Image: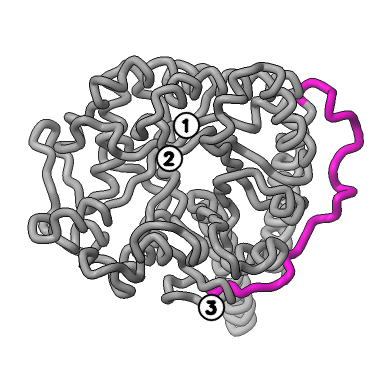
Amino acid sequence: MEASLMGRGSLGMSYLWALVLLSGLALSNALSSTSATTTGINYGQVADDLPTPELVVGLLQSSNISRIKLFTVNATVLQAFANTGIELIVGVGNDIVASLTDPNSATEWVSANIQAYLPATKITCIAVGNEVYTGTDTQLMANLVPAMQNIHSALVSIGADTDIKITTPHALLVLNTSYPPSAGSFQPGLVGLIEPLLNLLSQTGSPFFINAYPYFAYNESPSQIPLAYVLFEPNANVVDTKNNYVYNNMLYAQVDAVYSALSALGYPNLEVIVSETGWPSKGDADEPGATLQNAQTYNGNLLQLLAQNKGTPLRPNVVLQAYLFALFNEDMKPGATSEMNYGLFEPDGTEVYNVGLTGSLSMGTKKESTSYPTGSADTPNYYSSFAKETCTDISFYNHLQVLALSSFLVLLLFLP
């Protein structure tokens, strides 16, 4: 009897360990899925040798990248990404912002460039303009918020405003003060423009986009800024003496400076998303930081940091989201050599350097389009309700599978 009990106990322990192992794998998959949602990438197309969007879909999927940001509307890209599950931020060029100050034009633009691709293409945000407030076109600055308001109204009219947010990316130069982070403030001359924008973002539940590049700060003062601090490497850290928060990397400090600036204007609850950040792998003689090793270290460490699903010292409970710049090296970008060399991949799909992304150019996989509900896109909240139903279905079936597997293993544990 004793030997029999020992044998049964040994078998039971084996099943128990199997249950623990499978539970751990399930948790690991869940964490991996969550971390993937915090990282996106900018898909620029200022090049003459890029692969087709269909092949790019496969590259992204095999690299476990589920979010991209486009700088302009591209019908071929929007069609290629249909039914892939990849989330897209669609950009609106500075050159057409003025036309969108007319409500009818904005409605037509949304109909042709957004509604036409829903719900198959998973558009989650519209980024109107780019770094408008740090440019020199004062009329463009004045047109920005009215254009955004009209686009939002058009989204409301088709019931897509819940799932598609509206925002605009800013250069870090919108800040007057960024150090220490707790003293962050906007340029005084921009406050009159920024306040109506922040009000719109707050009303629509949209994030504040910032293009944050520690590379630029280092390149301007390489002798004063520790390289390890900007590359997420071990360093002496920087302490904000006002609140004693400790910063072990410049990106966190830059983001928290933006949070402080938003709080100073009465908008502490707006989420800050890094719409661009990256490091060039090659540069000119006056760009000492632009090396392949630095680029690999910056982007590799950033990916690992984002995978931890953490917030910044000032907003520890708000998981930081960031979009790396960029997917490909782009040979037609004007300016310094570095401008053409921010890509993680060459146009032929080979890695510029290894940051742990193992993807390759291939035809991506698509979900069956018949899985989308039948009904009219004119139905109020149609897109919103579909997204909620889809997420609920996925969550329900995942939980059902885990429950069934766990129950089966527990049953085996108690079998004689």
Residue visible at 63% across and 32% down in the picture: 164
Which circle's residue, 2 or 1, is located before the other in the chain? 1
Residue identifier under label 3: 350
Secondary element at tag 2: strand
Are dots 2 and 1 in contact, CB under 8 Å? yes
Are dots 2 and 3 in contact, CB under 8 Å? no
Location of residue 40 in the rendering, given as x and y in whole percent from the top left corner: 51, 52
Dominant SS of magenta comes to loop
The mark lying in front, picked from 2 and 3, is: 3
Location of residue 401 in the rendering, given as x and y in whole percent from the top left corner: 73, 56
Residue 411 in view here: no
Which circle's residue, 1 or 3, is located before the other in the chain? 1
Residue identifier under label 2: 273
Secondary element at tag 3: loop
Tell me which corner region of the image, top left, top right, bottom left or bottom right, holds residue 98: top right
Residue visible at 35% across and 31% down in the picture: 136
Distance Cα–Cα, label 1 vs label 3: 33 Å
Residue visible at 36% across and 34% down in the picture: 135
Kind of residue sitting beneath label 1: Pro
Of residue 236 and residue 201, the one placed in the foreground of this image is 201
Residue visible at 64% across and 81% down in the picture: 4
Which circle's residue, 2 or 3, is located before the other in the chain? 2
- Quadrant location, the C terminus: bottom right
- The image shows residue 384, relative to residue 308, as above or below, that is above
- Left or right: 307 as drawn, with respect to 28: left
- Left or right: 158 as drawn, with respect to 227: right
Tell me which corner region of the image, top left, top right, bottom left or bottom right, holds residue 361: bottom right
Distance Cα–Cα, label 2 vs label 3: 28 Å
Q: Which residues are magenta?
A: 358-381
Location of residue 374 in the rendering, given as x and y in whole percent from the top left corner: 91, 36
Q: Residues within 10 Å of mark 2 (few under 14, many from 20)?
A: many
Magenta stretch: residue 360 in it?
Answer: yes
